[in-house]
Image (tube, grey):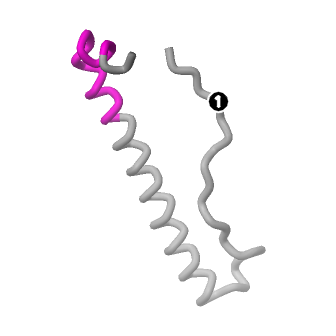
């Protein structure tokens, strides 16, 4: 079925690739922020109430039509 959708809608591929690229950028940004926060925590743990936690995915339900 996906072959039919992609052949009838050539912009479908671009939309999927754009969403994937955005998710990859968000994931990369989350890990960069985690790494810098971890460095700051190791230098000055008294400034934080607890240690930084690993980035996680949001729990959300998406419906693709």
Location of residue 7 by image quarter: top left
18 versus 63 height, above or below = below
x and y, in percent, of residue 2 in the image: 37, 20
Q: Residue at x 31, y 19 (%)?
A: 3
Residue bearing mark 1: 61
Q: Residue at x 26, y 28 (%)?
A: 14
Q: For the view shown, which residue lies furthest in the top direction? A: 8
Magenta region, main secondary structure: helix
Where, quadrant-wise, is the N terminus in this rendering?
top left
In the foreground, 40 or 10: 10
47 versus 4 height, above or below = below
Q: Is residue 6 left or right of residue 50?
A: left
x and y, in percent, of residue 4 in the image: 31, 13
Whether the magenta-drawn stretch holds residue 13 is answered as yes
Q: Which residues are magenta?
A: 4-18
Location of residue 48 by image quarter: bottom right
49 versus 23 height, above or below = below
Q: Is residue 51 left or right of residue 13?
A: right
Q: For the view shown, which residue lies furthest in the right direction? A: 49
Q: Is residue 19 left or right of residue 59?
A: left
Q: Residue at x 65, y 35 (%)?
A: 60
x and y, in percent, of residue 34 in the image: 54, 68
């Amino acid at each position: 079925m996906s072959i039919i959708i992609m052949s009838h809608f050539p912009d479908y591929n671009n939309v999927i690739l754009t969403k994937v690229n955005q998710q990859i950028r968000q994931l990369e940004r989350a890990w960069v922020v985690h790494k810098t926060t971890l460095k700051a925590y190791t230098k000055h743990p008294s400034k934080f109430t607890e240690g930084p936690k690993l980035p996680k995915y949001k729990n959300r339900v998406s419906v693709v039509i």
